[in-house]
Image: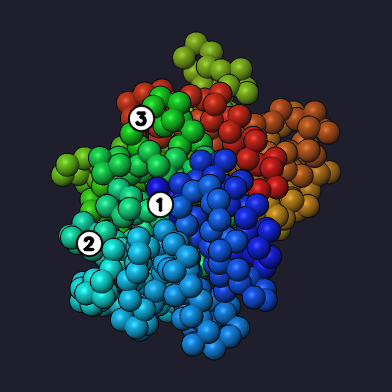
Amino acid sequence: MICVSIARGRHRHVIAEHRHLAEQGAQLVEIRLDYIRGSVNVKRLLQDRPCPVVMTCRRERDGGKFPGTEAERQLLLRTTIAEGADYVDLEEDIAASIPRYGSTKRIISYHDFRQTPDNLEALHARLAKLDADIVKICTMANRPQDNTRMFRLLSQVNVPTVAFCMGDMGIPSRLLAGKFGAPFTYATFHVDRALAPGQLSFEQMKTVYAYDDIRRDTEVYGVIADPVGHSLSPLIHNSAFRHFKLNKVYIPIRVPREELHAFLDEAPIWDIKGLSVTIPHKEAVLGRLSKADSIVRGVGAANTIVFTENERLGYNTDCRAAMEAIEAALGGAVGGASPLKGKRALVLGAGGAGKAVAYGVLRAGGEVVLTDGDEEKARLLAEKLNCTHTPWEERHAVQPDILANCTPVGMHPNVDETPFEAQHLRSAMLLFDAVYNPENTLLIKDARARNCKVVTGVEMFVRQACMQFKLFTGRDGPAELMRETLKRATSAAKW
């Protein structure tokens, strides 16, 4: 169940949002009394309520906005109990001074906006003793492992407990709280009105992650990156899971570089079965794989991990997807030979995507010239792949058959940038751009204006996602559904 927080300044707006949420399927709302301007009329807020209510009034030190005295705040909380609120949220330090009355259930809560303390079990035991119907622990995640500690806590408690981490690193604990036994988690009314760091909207929780369908036996998949908030992979993979009615969920997981190894070791505790891997981890994961396919070994990067009972299997679907997309645009194989054979490719960028494309072209019998803003990076990759490189400032002199942009230049929000000047594009070129948001980058527009063949980042992204989906599920990925979902998301202002 999702508890949706309402924080508005006027009673009529609170009541309107409450009704709207109930119509949208919300089963529980939290009314933040500390946001209401002026005198609070509790009876009016509770009268004819369309679904159960948690009444909360936070002090500033607990992330709230209540402007009055502490005595006034506690009087307001007592009033909510007297008026028959379904739940009242009481902080640990005041719980003993506000006794139980009537049918109102008590949520005894603890908030730490700086860290996740070491003594979670002891903290929980302390809160549970305060006549708690539900214990709530909300702390700041400073490392992915803080989520793991919340999952462990939820798995071993006897009192109904809502426990999760704040911040973008804590989002997994919000999404997986129900899997590990929490009676509900929290969401905000709208994506632009988050009341705590890392809080997702009710719409996101419901439509992107299908939170209420997540059960204890739901398998977990995700994308690891740093940062990870921009990733659209959760959208397309979750839409595909729902298409096939699979008991799986795909979540964003922010993993700093220095936390990668510890996170992978703890992944089984999360019930993680598969991961998409992106910047900055594609190379760093290699040392933590049990086995890797030939492309991973050749490229030196993996973008997919599949977890079995005893192994971590690494794959690189970027390379296969890019080559399939480029070869299809060139007319496909002729007599078993790749259309890339004998072609010269200029690859912009020596990161994970650049490695994948360069390796794929060379493997198909083509010639590769690498370039990167970091010339040493391009030189080292060229030495590893046994191809040539050129300084970034001299890239326009190469005159390739295939131009592959594997840099983030042109990605939203920097849509007016291009990594290759338009006057150097020739109609005989094929232009491949790995950027998928937006699909029609400035580079793609310039290439089309000069009658180049083009392969957009959407095409590669969907192909590699379909390959990942096959590795995760054993089923062919629904390419058209993924493509429609991705295009809809990249054309929308919000998702």
Question: Is residue 473 placed above or below 14 in the rendered structure?
Answer: above
Is residue 289 among the parts visible in the rendering? no
Q: Secondary structure at mark 3?
A: loop
Q: Quadrant of residue 441?
A: top right
Which residue is disc 2 drawn over?
159
Among numbered discs 2 and 1, the one appearing first in the sequence: 2
The residue sitting at 58% across, 60% down in the picture is 45
The residue sitting at 17% across, 42% down in the picture is 309
Which residue is disc 1 drawn over?
175
Is 278 left or right of 94, judged from the image as shown?
right
Q: Quadrant of residue 95?
A: bottom left
Q: Secondary structure at mark 2?
A: loop
* Residue 7 locus on image (x, y percent): 60, 64
Q: Give me the C-alpha separation between circle 2 and circle 1.
A: 20 Å
Which residue is disc 3 drawn over?
246
* Residue 25 locus on image (x, y percent): 51, 41
